[in-house]
Amino acid sequence: MTTVTREMILAVSDGQWMSKARLEGTEKLAREFLLPRGSGSIVWTFYEAPAALQSLCSFNGGDEDWLVLRRAPFESLPRWIDMEPDYDVYLLDEVTIYVTSHS
């Protein structure tokens, strides 16, 4: 498991990963997906997820399988994700994104 924080994303110099403005836009998009549904999480196959989330979370270079967007804090890991052999966690402003991948 790899945990990526908001601060880590912003620490990459000169926006090589993602600029602050683009990250804030992606966080806003993530919150807006969750608000109308009133649910705690949304699950997509990775390549059906919104492009902004894909570009933020493509840490494994094409081996991604599922993307789960949650309001819940990191401590409330969905049980089925915890059983996956490889996943990454992105801790953003008010949302947590889990990405499972195969190797």
Image: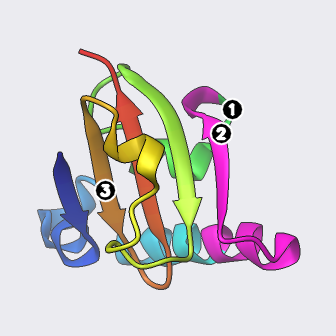
Q: Report whether 97 appears left or right of 45.
A: left
Q: Which residues are magenta?
A: 29-47
- Rendered residue at 66%/69% (across/down): 29
Choose between 66 and 30: the one closer to the eye. Answer: 66
Decide: few, some or many residues near mark 3? Use Cα within 10 Å; few <14, some 14-19, many ≥20: many
- The residues tagged by marks 2 and 3 sit, at their Cα atoms, a distance apart of 15 Å
Q: Are marks 1 and 2 in contact (CB under 8 Å)?
A: yes
The amino acid at mark 1 is Glu
Q: Position of residue 5 (x, y in %)?
A: 23, 70
Would you say residue 39 sits in the magenta stretch?
A: yes
Q: Secondary structure at mark 3?
A: strand
Report the front residue among 93 and 11.
Answer: 93
Instruction: Bin the neighbour count of mark 1 within 10 Å (Cα to Cα): few under 14, some 14-19, many 20 and up.
Output: few
Res. 89 mark: 3
Q: Position of residue 34 (x, y in %)?
A: 72, 71
Q: Examine the rendered structure and indicate whether residue 69 appears above or below residue 82.
A: below
Q: Residue at x 22, y 61 (%)?
A: 4
Q: Residue furthest top?
A: 103
Most foreground residue, 65 or 9: 65
Q: Which residue is mark 2?
A: 44
Identify the image quadrant of the C terminus.
top left
Instruction: Identify the disc placed on residue 48.
Output: 1
Q: Is residue 9 above or below residue 80?
A: below
User: In the image, what residue occupies the spot 56% across and 76% down?
Assistant: 71
Q: Is residue 56 magenta?
A: no
Distance Cα–Cα, label 1 vs label 2: 6 Å
Which circle, 1 or 2, is nearer the viewer?
2
- Whole-Å distance between the Cαs marked 1 and 3? 18 Å
Q: Quadrant of residue 62?
A: top left
Q: Residue at x 44, y 83 (%)?
A: 93
Q: Is residue 84 left or right of residue 21?
A: left
